[in-house]
């Protein structure tokens, strides 16, 4: 549904407009149940903003005059839990719906106006009464949406102090919607940036991911940098600001990172990889014969990435995947590589990750501004990888046609390092020549190993 918004006065929707919003049945029944119990209840927050902008609605939040205890009592037959103060979450078919008591001064039961007056931004401080079809806009949210501006409700410093995460949220909403941040709201951020240190790392992490998933994250990062917010949770990124590189790069370290992030597909893993892939470059930069070099920056960046992501409470799986992509992103391919060398690259990076790595490397090269032979080499490598992946490729020792028991039996050795060494030798042989990966051929190779061991043993004894 699309609304023409010209004023900040309340808008009463026509019945057909209200019907087109497609409010979930569970939300409607929840509102009706609260009303029947004698409480006021409204749909509230970002959902109203998204309705006005004709954006998909993912979260349906409700505000009510009922207290937490009254909410739980009213819905005692429905699964619910409380994680945040004054918020009860109802669970219906695995979907969570938040119901929040009216916010007021000193946690006292308040009016709808007081509740909306304590919300973060005007475009999130609107409510919908489904009984009347009226969008209740008491603080100019509709007008701000029409002006494409993110503005705090009332005094920005008061709103940010209530919840410092709003400092990041405002930047994120600005990036998501392509809106500017209001002058007074923007001016209030630098003096309060340090408050971000009091926010749980998990909440900062979630906002960071959301910022990275916007159309052009670099715009949001520019605001984060200028307001001092970036230094509060990702100061390592600032080390590359205005830092020159070398003849292979047309941009500074920081600018290159931003160019890479903007060009990368909006996938959380890839965008995080882009953001952190050169994070340690400033720490390894050295000047040799008048030229800046960044030897080993990929390994150093992978190590620093793990530290940063652990600090921000990312999952072990995400930390491992991002750091692995970063550790291997400098593919120093040459067209004279043998097929075995290409297979080793596939095995090292991981068959399931190699294509993602190659896609990221292309974006990384494009973000250099200076395009050279490396792009042609990369395209050649992508073709070779595709051809080799169409053929059976042993990636681990378990893919070999023989196992440890057969190795011990043929070599006449017990469990231990010798078995692992033998399997490693076979793995290298098969990597160069996949056709060797049959039981008959590998047994023949093992017999040759045994013969060499016997000859070496006799020489050693003599």
Image (tube, rainbow, N blue to C red):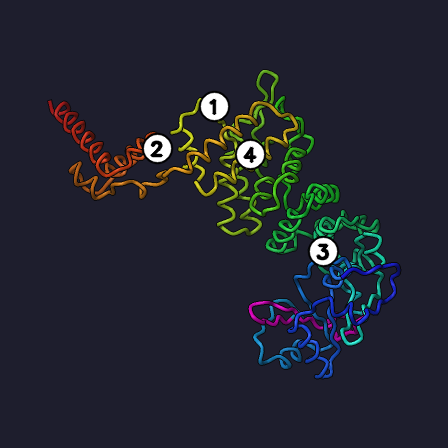
Q: Earlier in the sequence, mark 2 or mark 3?
A: 3
User: Which residue corresponds to mark 2?
Assistant: 431
User: Which residue corresponds to mark 4?
Assistant: 361
Separation of disc 1 and disc 4 at Cα? Answer: 17 Å
Looking at the picture, tell me which residue is in the foreground, 107 or 170: 170
User: Which residue corresponds to mark 3?
Assistant: 166
Question: Bounds of the magenta span?
Answer: 88-113
Q: Is mark 1 on a helix, strand or loop?
A: loop
Q: Which of marks 3 and 1 is nearer the N terminus?
A: 3
x, y percent for residue 173: 72, 53
Picture quadrant where residue 460 is located: top left
User: Which residue corresponds to mark 1?
Assistant: 335
106 falls in the magenta region: yes
Point out the frontmost of discs 2 and 3: 2
Left or right: residue 455 versus residue 335 is left
Point out the frontmost of discs 1 and 4: 1
Q: Is mark 2 on a helix, strand or loop?
A: helix
Separation of disc 1 and disc 2 at Cα? Answer: 18 Å
189 falls in the magenta region: no
Separation of disc 4 and disc 3 at Cα? Answer: 35 Å
Q: Is mark 3 on a helix, strand or loop?
A: helix
Separation of disc 2 and disc 3 at Cα? Answer: 53 Å
Say few, some or many: other residues with alpha carbon within 10 Å of mark 3 (under 14 / 14 to 19 / 20 or more): many
Separation of disc 2 and disc 4 at Cα? Answer: 24 Å
Q: Earlier in the sequence, mark 1 or mark 2?
A: 1
Looking at the picture, tell me which residue is in the foreground, 390 or 315: 390
């Amino acid at each position: 549904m699309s609304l023409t918004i010209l004023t900040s006065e309340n808008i009463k929707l026509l019945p057909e407009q209200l019907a087109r919003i497609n409010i979930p049945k569970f939300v409607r029944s929840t509102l009706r149940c609260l009303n029947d119990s004698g409480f006021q209840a409204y749909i509230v927050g970002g959902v109203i903003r998204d309705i006005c902008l004709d954006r998909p609605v993912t979260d349906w939040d409700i505000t009510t005059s009922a207290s937490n205890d009254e909410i739980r009592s009213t819905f005692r037959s429905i699964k619910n839990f409380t994680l945040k103060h004054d918020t009860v979450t109802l669970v219906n078919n695995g979907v969570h719906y938040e119901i929040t008591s009216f916010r007021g001064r000193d946690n006292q039961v308040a009016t709808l106006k007081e509740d909306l007056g304590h919300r973060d931004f005007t475009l999130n401080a609107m409510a919908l009464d489904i009984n009347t079809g009226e969008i209740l806009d008491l603080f100019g949210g509709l007008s701000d949406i029409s002006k494409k501006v993110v503005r705090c409700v009332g005094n920005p410093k008061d709103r940010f102090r209530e919840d410092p995460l709003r400092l990041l949220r405002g930047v994120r909403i600005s990036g998501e919607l392509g809106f500017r941040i209001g002058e007074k709201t923007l001016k209030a951020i630098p003096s309060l940036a340090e408050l971000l240190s009091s926010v749980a790392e998990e909440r900062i992490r979630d906002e960071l991911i959301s910022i990275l998933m916007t159309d052009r994250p670099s715009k949001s990062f520019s605001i984060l940098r200028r307001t001092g917010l970036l230094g509060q949770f990702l100061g390592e990124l600032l080390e590359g600001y205005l830092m020159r590189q070398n003849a292979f790069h047309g941009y500074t370290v920081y600018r290159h990172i931003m160019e890479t992030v903007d060009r990368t597909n909006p996938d959380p893993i890839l965008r995080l990889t882009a953001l952190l892939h050169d994070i340690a470059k400033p720490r390894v930069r050295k000047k040799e014969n008048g030229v800046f070099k960044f030897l080993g920056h990929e390994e150093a960046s992978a190590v620093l990435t793990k530290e940063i992501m652990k600090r921000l409470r990312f999952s072990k799986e995400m930390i491992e995947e991002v750091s692995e992509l970063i550790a291997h992103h400098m593919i120093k391919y040459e067209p004279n590589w043998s097929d075995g060398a290409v297979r080793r690259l596939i095995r090292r990076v991981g068959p399931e990750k190699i294509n993602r790595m190659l896609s990221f490397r292309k974006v990384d090269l494009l973000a250099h501004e200076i395009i050279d032979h490396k792009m042609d080499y990369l395209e050649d490598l992508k073709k070779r990888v595709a051809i080799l992946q169409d053929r059976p490729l042993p990636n681990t020792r378990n893919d070999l046609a023989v196992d440890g028991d057969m190795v011990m039996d043929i070599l006449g050795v017990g469990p231990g390092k010798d078995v692992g060494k033998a399997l490693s030798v076979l793995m290298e042989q098969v990597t160069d020549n996949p056709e060797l990966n049959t039981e008959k051929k590998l047994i023949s190779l093992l017999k040759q190993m045994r013969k060499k061991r016997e000859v070496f043993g006799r020489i050693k004894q003599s």
